[in-house]
């Protein structure tokens, strides 16, 4: 194997993919992947290692692709014979996490807002939610009281439907636009030749991998490593509760929108209505999932992942928990004088989530989905590596 200094120099050269200077995260990731490519002990752990084995060099585009393909399960760190304190200091989960953070900033739209990733944290998320809630509270106080019973628990009597649409639709629309343009730019860089090859089998495969969170099983089906070298499936389970809870809440909102605009059925809806049942189930999942992820995140081995991103992770988790807790409280207490206050708190948290979606932890799911699609396409192709002949 080459001396360590030579590996570092070669990795820096290979990481170049455009005219920008090679970053420390790119150089370090390329160095570690070259060592891994020579070893290949972890080839069965997740998609990163077979994807890595299809390459002899790691230009910038491939580094960003592999970083987002990594699910940070931690299995390779605990199996690696070159992990610290070895002089090679191979820590793939941490190197990939640091590079993912750079990816989100590099591909943010508009580009000037990419620096928000460096400042997006727990305090910022909670402060933004509180500020938006306070703004809504002041609006309510101008018209009445924050502590009063509303006939029929009708929150449209506090914030008319048209007003809520005018407040939330532009923010949500901008978030979708920013995320869409960012991931489109990412896709063009990491997979320029594959842009038109999103075949149905590959798309179905990538969707299945994403919905199952397949690569959070540690490669052996027994789960991730979290605070030590013991395997646990709880990280995968709490991710599932969070993701499907969010999707059920989104489905509840979508069905309610159809009720309102297509059939003219105006909220509030009864407990046995489809929007209420979907929202309740989703809210419970979105309460349990983030609570579990918060606990695991606080206990996680600092060698796994990027410690500088912990505040961003916790901020996202806190917002999701706040949305679900206030939403469930709103449903349970809508007939009490607490309705106006709870509604302001809930809408403030939702607005804060929408506003930070393109520049916070939410983006990791979008970029990871694109990387999984790239892998689903790539693995169906014959490898370009061939044995040379004299």
Image (cartoon, helix red, strand yellow):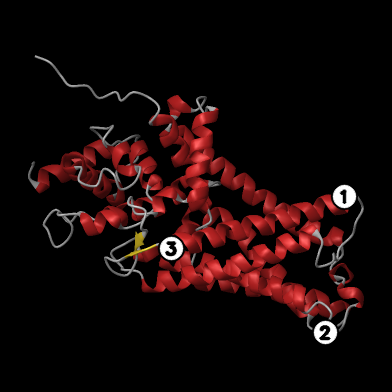
Q: Is residue 381 visible?
A: yes
Whole-percent x and y of residue 284? 63, 68
Instruction: Determine which residue is flagged by label 1.
Output: 261
Whole-percent x and y of residue 300? 35, 69
Please tell me the numbered disc located at residue 119.
Answer: none
Residue 101 sits in which quadrant? Answer: bottom left
The one of 20 and 376 positioned closer to us in this rendering: 376
Q: Is residue 88 left or right of residue 383?
A: left
- Name the N-terminal-most of marks 1 and 3: 3
- Residue beneath the point at 15% across and 54% down: 82
Instruction: Determine which residue is flagged by label 2.
Output: 337
- Residue beneath the point at 85% across and 53% down: 259
Instruction: Determine which residue is flagged by label 3.
Output: 235
The residue tagged with tag 1: helix, strand or loop? helix
The residue tagged with tag 3: helix, strand or loop? helix
Image quadrant containing the N terminus: top left
**Disc 2 to disc 3, C-alpha distance:** 38 Å
**Disc 1 to disc 3, C-alpha distance:** 39 Å
User: Looking at this rendering, what residue extends furthest in the front direction?
Assistant: 221
Whole-percent x and y of residue 68? 41, 46
Whole-percent x and y of residue 40? 20, 42
Disc 1 residue crowd, few under 14, some 14–19, many 20+, Cα 10 Å: few
- Name the N-terminal-most of marks 2 and 3: 3
């Amino acid at each position: 194997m080459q001396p360590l200094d030579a590996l570092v120099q070669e990795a820096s050269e290979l990481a170049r993919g455009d005219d920008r200077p090679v970053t420390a995260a790119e150089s370090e990731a390329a160095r570690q992947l070259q060592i891994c490519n020579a070893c290949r002990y972890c080839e069965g752990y997740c998609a990163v290692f077979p994807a890595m084995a299809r390459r002899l060099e790691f230009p910038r585009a491939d580094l960003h692709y592999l970083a987002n393909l990594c699910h940070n399960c931690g299995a390779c760190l605990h199996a690696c014979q070159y992990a610290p304190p070895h002089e090679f200091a191979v820590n793939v989960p941490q190197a990939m996490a640091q590079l993912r953070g750079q990816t989100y900033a590099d591909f943010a739209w508009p580009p000037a807002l990419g620096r928000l990733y460096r400042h997006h944290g727990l305090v910022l998320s909670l402060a933004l939610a509180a500020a938006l809630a306070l703004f809504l509270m002041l609006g309510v106080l101008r018209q009445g009281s924050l502590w009063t019973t509303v006939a029929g628990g009708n929150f449209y009597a506090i914030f008319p439907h048209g007003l809520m649409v005018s407040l939330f639709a532009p923010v949500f629309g901008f978030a979708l636009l920013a995320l869409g343009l960012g991931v489109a730019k990412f896709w063009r860089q990491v997979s320029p030749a594959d842009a038109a090859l999103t075949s149905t089998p590959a798309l179905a495969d990538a969707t299945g991998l994403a919905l199952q969170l397949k690569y959070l099983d540690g490669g052996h089906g027994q789960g991730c490593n979290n605070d030590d070298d013991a395997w646990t499936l709880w990280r995968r389970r709490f991710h599932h509760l969070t993701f499907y809870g969010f999707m059920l809440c989104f489905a509840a909102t979508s069905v309610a929108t159809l009720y309102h605009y297509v059939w003219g059925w105006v909220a509030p809806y009864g407990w046995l209505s489809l929007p209420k049942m979907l929202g309740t189930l989703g809210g419970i999942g979105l309460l349990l999932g983030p609570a579990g992820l918060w606990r695991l995140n606080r206990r996680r081995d600092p060698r796994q992942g990027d410690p500088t991103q912990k505040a961003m992770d916790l901020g996202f988790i806190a917002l999701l928990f706040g949305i679900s807790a206030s939403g469930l409280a709103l449903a349970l207490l809508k007939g009490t004088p607490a309705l106006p206050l709870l509604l302001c708190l809930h809408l403030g948290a939702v607005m804060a989530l929408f506003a930070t979606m393109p520049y916070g932890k939410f983006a990791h799911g979008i970029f990871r989905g694109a990387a999984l699609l790239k892998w689903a396409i790539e693995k169906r192709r014959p490898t370009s590596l061939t044995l040379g002949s004299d």
